[in-house]
Amino acid sequence: MRGGSLENLRQEHIGRLFLLGSRVFERLALAELRANGFDDLRLVHLALIRALPVEGLRTTEIGEIAGMTKQAVGQLAIELEKAGYVVRLPDPTDGRAKLVRYAARGQSLVAVIPQVLLRAEARIEQMVGGEDFIVMRRALRRLLALSGEGQEGHG
């Protein structure tokens, strides 16, 4: 899309398409999670789940990875703790900080994530076609490699 009206640009610029495409993927993944019995999860919860490694992490570090405030991460952690997905513990190295770790239900969630992601990808591949899916993945990998994103130390 080159040129065109301001409204066309607002609707069709690559950033918006990336954002909306990401939302499609997240909704498909959430539907798969719900089909696997995790029907109390909401889209907003995926930000914390995506950023939380198996060994756990401080809320401030989760916020840095997820691009969220410590307060927003704290609120999500409280919601996910009430639902049995995570536990919040005092950080042994800093009593003011909280560590977030997966509880038993969260560990069950983590166990199905690989299959959920593969199914969500398969749905997108079905929607756009195999060849376009391969081209899209290749282009995104190249973009990330050239920009330095997706490497260690980048969220």
Image (cartoon, helix red, strand yellow):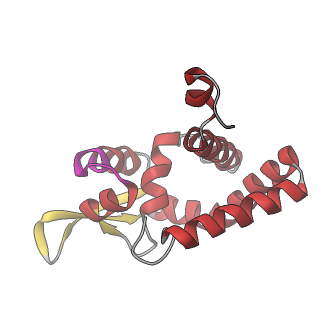
To which quarter of the image does residue 93 belong? Answer: bottom left
**Viewer-side residue, 31 vs 155:** 155
Tally the marks. 0
Query: What type of secondary structure mainly makes up the magenta span?
Result: helix
Q: Is residue 115 visible?
A: no
Q: Position of residue 55 (x, y in %)?
A: 40, 76
The residue at the point 55 percent across, 43 percent down is 15
Q: Is residue 54 left or right of residue 94?
A: right
Q: Is residue 1 magenta?
A: no
The residue at the point 65 percent across, 68 percent down is 141
In the figure, 26 relative to 63: above or below? above
In the figure, 27 relative to 149: above or below? above
**Viewer-side residue, 82 vs 129:** 129
Q: Is residue 87 visible?
A: yes
Q: Which residues are magenta?
A: 67-74
Q: Is residue 148 left or right of residue 25?
A: left
Q: Position of residue 137 (x, y in %)?
A: 73, 62
In the figure, 64 relative to 53: above or below? above
